[in-house]
Amino acid sequence: MAKNPTESLLQQAARWHAIASGRDLSADESRSLDGWLAQNASHRLAYADICAAAFALEQSQAANEPVRAAVPAARSARPWLRWGLAAGAPLLLVLALVAGPRVSPNWQNWNSDLYTEIGKPLSQKLADGSVLELDTDSAVRVRLSPERRDIELIRGRLAIAVAKDPNRPLHVLSGGVDAMAVGTRFVVDRGDLGTEVGVHEGIVRVTAANGKPVDLGAGQQAFVANDDGAAKVGALASNDGWTRGVLSVEQMPLSQVLAELDRYLPERIILADETHAAMPITATLPLDDPAAALRALAQTSQLNLRHIPRIAYVMR
């Protein structure tokens, strides 16, 4: 399995579980899995988390099914059993960790002026007349004074329709990025890898960590990587449909569509087979019911969904 550097340990473990539980592993795959598990105890604990949750779900489903005449023989030396027991995590503790919902970081919420829970965007008119829209699982600090207007994006994504004030530009700060506008509409997305600024109206000046400002016009966007500091400018690729409660995409890779839906669900979405990551998707999906949107996407794309606590697998 190719390693995706942006995946969390839990996501890597979930992908391995999807492979190992769907079929017998080849000799190379078995060696790769054993190597990944042997790298660190945290890898083994993450894998045990996923396996314990899957086991609990299987037991729950079995309890509600009629007794069958024959029970299929269990595989010998299943990796999840071998390593799950070796991890040494008590089953009840593992289940408590895995079965709980994904939650927003409380410390960020406590240190913010406005925040949103997962799946609950918010629109707020500010004291200066600007309209701030926070996407799901986002948090900001707002500082308005007679001399300056600052909004710090702590987490997530925002859209801002800036009330015009030539003497007091509005700044959206995200990490080392400063997006400044006098009166316009733009979107700022703070992700794990960096910050993206997309302009829908007017002009926004983006100053990256290297101190070089870039002026963006309507229809342009810039991405500043955390480890780079330079703004990479291109045509506006992301849209602001989320402010209207929809995810509207045209020829967007499946992996990106799933990443967008993942923002709105308490469970993590895992694409079990990366060979389908580039599948182009054209669709308009409702974000007020992201679970239904995920089901519709899977059905129309001839994909299958498999759920275990905190994880939704998407597979062929």
Image (tube, grey):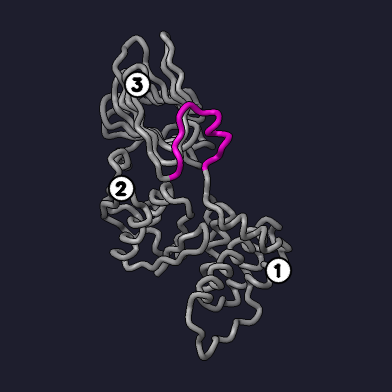
Q: Is residue 110 magenta?
A: yes
**Residue ID for mark 1:** 85
Q: Residue furthest bottom?
A: 69
The tag earlier along the polypeptide, 2 or 3, is 3
Q: SS of the residue at dot 2?
A: strand
Mark 1 to mark 3: distance in Å?
56 Å
For label 1, the crowd category at 10 Å Cα-Cα, with few meaning under 14, some 14 to 19 and many 20 or more, is some
Q: Nearer the viewer, mark 2 or mark 3?
A: 2
**Disc 3: CA contacts within 10 A as few (<14), some (14-19) or many (>=20):** many
Residue 158 visible (yes or no): yes
Is 199 above or below relative to 291? Answer: above
Place of residue 61 in the rendered image (x, y in percent of width and height, measured from the top left) = 50, 73
In the image, which residues are magenta?
104-118
Residue bearing the label numbered 3: 181
Q: Disc 1 vs disc 3: which is toward the camera? A: 1
Mark found first going from the N terminus, 1 or 3: 1
Please report the residue visible at 43 percent of the width from the left and 51 percent of the height from the top: 265
Q: Amino acid at mark 3?
A: Ala
SS for callout 1: helix
Q: Is residue 282 above or below residue 22?
A: above
